Image: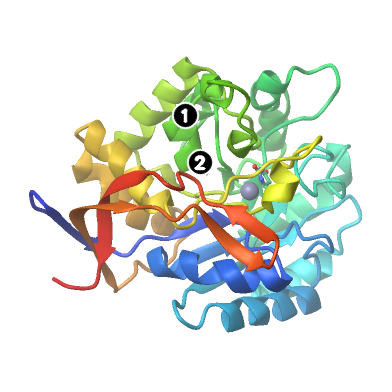
Amino acid sequence: MKIYKKKIIMIKPDDFHVHLRDGKILKKIANYTGKYYNKVIVMPNLKNPINTIKKALKYKKKIVNSSKKNKFIPLMTFYITENSNIKELEIGFLKKIFFSAKLYFKNSTNLSQYGISNLSKINKILEKMEELKIPLMIHGEIYSKNIDIFSREIFFIKNVLPKIRKNFPNLKIVLEHISTKNSAKYVLNNPPNIAATVTPHHLLYNRNDIFSNGINPHLYCLPILNKRNHQKYLIKTVTSGNKYFFLGSDSAPHLISKKENFCGSPGIFNAPTSLIIYLKIFEKMKKLKNFESFCSINGSKFYNLPLNKEKIIFKKKNWIVKNNIKINKNKKISIFLGKQTLSWKITKKK
Ligand code: DOR
Ligand code: ZN
């Protein structure tokens, strides 16, 4: 990595957690991810969840066809349900169709209705994953009417994760989009089989921002933005360069009509701005020297993937982010930090 006053050159980053959706939305957004990222873990929570080889292959083909301008390597995930076909995952993994599997607890987030209510129902699949070294990606929140929304991740870390780890100590686990100090501390205290991804929005904002000058549905994501002390702890941990923390943007597009709705959807579309936001955070913390590890090294090392050969160049230059992306005549997706000025820009020129 080379850091100059107005220029940075480093290995092209990877995004280890992205929602690309399907259909028209996929076609309109995929190239944004390819512009900034090389290896990309694609989430399986489509309306028809990705839980067979056939579905994964078909989806992967659509992704490749939608990102011809800015190519990237899609890594497919298997959606775990209580009735998962273990053979599909096993064969799919051995044939390199599936890279990992994703665990959602029932009703914890968008399209998690096929997720898990009873952990013991997935013992067999976790056993197989441990044996074959298939990484388990977890949305670590337990949904229940009795658990406060700001404590769902903490409940999972305290009461559920230790059980999984006790039963499957060699299982490789990634806690996705962590939002609390509790999760970060768990990862720090439990090497080497567990790591975490952190999103730009959980680093940039806290729950007060959702309610500043009115309610902002475009800051609604899950896990929900938490208290300022959690945000601060995440910033400190991520920028420290610790190798168990890496980039996963959780870019999650929803139509504006679904966000600004009587019952709005969780998710923030940040693909066009995520990398620059992370950069801004590392710069502010005077930790630029750790930026490349977080974006382009730690994740690949944890997942035993090769580092990217391609480089990326940032130049200090103000630019105004587009406000939204048109899907068709009256459907749009709002871009995270749309209309705002960012002070670094990716360039192809040296
Ligand atoms: O904010 C989120 N959006 N969190 C998730 O876990 C899912 C995602 C989505 O699919 O929109
Ligand atoms: Zn996600």
Residue at disc 1, CB closer than 8 Å to ligand 1: no
* Residue corresponding to mark 1: 205
Q: Classify 340 as above or below 299.
A: above
Display colour scheme:
rainbow
Quadrant in which the N terminus appears: bottom left
Left/right placement of residue 75 relative to residue 303 reads right
* Residue corresponding to mark 2: 196
Q: Quadrant location of ligand 1?
A: top right
Left/right placement of residue 313 relative to residue 220 reads left
Residue 250: mark: none
Q: Classify 227 as above or below 80.
A: above
Left/right placement of residue 230 relative to residue 176 reads left
Label 1 neighbour load within 10 Å: few <14, some 14-19, many 20+: some
Residue at horizontal 27 percent and vertical 46 percent from the top: 291
Q: Classify 282 as above or below 57.
A: above
Residue at horizontal 48 percent and vertical 64 percent from the top: 33
Q: Position of residue 152 (x, y in %)?
A: 70, 24
Residue at horizontal 71 percent and vertical 79 percent from the top: 57
Q: Position of residue 237 (x, y in %)?
A: 37, 30
Task: Report the Cα–Cα distance between label 1 and label 2.
Answer: 18 Å
Quadrant in which the C terminus appears: bottom left
Kind of residue indicated by mark 2: Ala
Looking at the image, can residue 2 be seen? no
